[in-house]
Amino acid sequence: MKKILVVDDDCWILDACAQMLQFKNYDVNTAADVKEAKRKLEQKKFHMVISDINLPGETGMELLIHIKQKFPGTGVIMMSGNPKISEDECKRGGAFSYLRKPFDGNQFLSKVDAFFSKSTIKK
C-alpha cells in the first residue's frame, strides 16, 4: 500500500486531504508542522509527502529540501494559498507538483495519481 504523509497546520485541510486519500486506499499519516513531519519521516518510509508551504516554525520549502536530501525517491506535492509562490519555484526545489489553495478534490487526487502513474511503486 502506498504511504502518504500530509503536512498542514490547518486541521480542516489536513482532515479533508487525509479522508480523500484514505477513500482511495492510501495509507495516510498527518503532521501539523515540519518538526512532526521530520520525526514521522524517520520512523516510516513514505512514497509521497504533500505539504503546505506556510507552516509554523520551519517552512514547507525547508521540508522539501530536507526530503530531497534524505529521501530522494519520495514524491512531494507542495500546496499554498499564497499567490506569490509559483509552481516553477516548487518544481525547481524538487517538488513533483504544486497545488494552489483552494483546490477541489479532483485536482488534488489527479496530482497524486499522476505521480504514482509515473512511479514504479506498486500499490
Image (cartoon, rainbow, N blue to C red):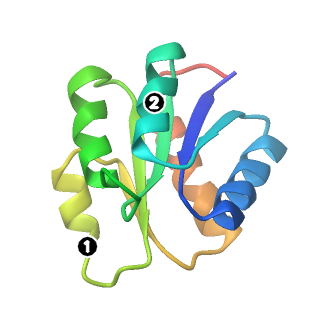
Are dots 1 and 2 in contact, CB under 8 Å?
A: no
Could you tell me how many numbered marks the image carries? Answer: 2
Of the pair 104 and 70, the residue shown nearer to us? 70
Residue at image location 76% in from the left, 53% down from the top: 20
Circle number at residue 17: none
Quadrant of residue 34 in the image?
top left
Q: Is residue 74 left or right of residue 29?
A: left
Where does the N terminus fall, quadrant-wise? top right
Q: Is residue 104 left or right of residue 78?
A: right
Residue under numbered circle 2: 119
User: What distance separates the C-alpha of mark 1 from that of mark 2?
Assistant: 24 Å
Q: Is residue 2 above or below residue 14?
A: above
Quadrant of residue 73 in the image?
top left
Residue at image location 44% in from the left, 63% down from the top: 79
Q: Residues within 10 Å of mark 2 (few under 14, many from 20)?
A: few
Residue at image location 59% in from the left, 35% down from the top: 4
| Residue 111, horizontal then vertical, whole percent | 52, 55
Where does the C terminus fall, quadrant-wise? top right
Residue at image location 53% in from the left, 56% down from the top: 8
Of the pair 35 and 86, the residue shown nearer to us? 35
Residue lying at the far bottom of the rendered structure: 83
Along the polypeptide, which appears first: circle 1 or circle 2? 1
Amino acid on which the number 2 mark rests in the picture: Ser
| Residue 15, horizontal then vertical, whole percent | 74, 56
Q: Is residue 60 left or right of residue 120?
A: left
Residue under numbered circle 1: 86
| Residue 68, horizontal then vertical, whole percent | 25, 32
Of the pair 53 and 68, the residue shown nearer to us? 53
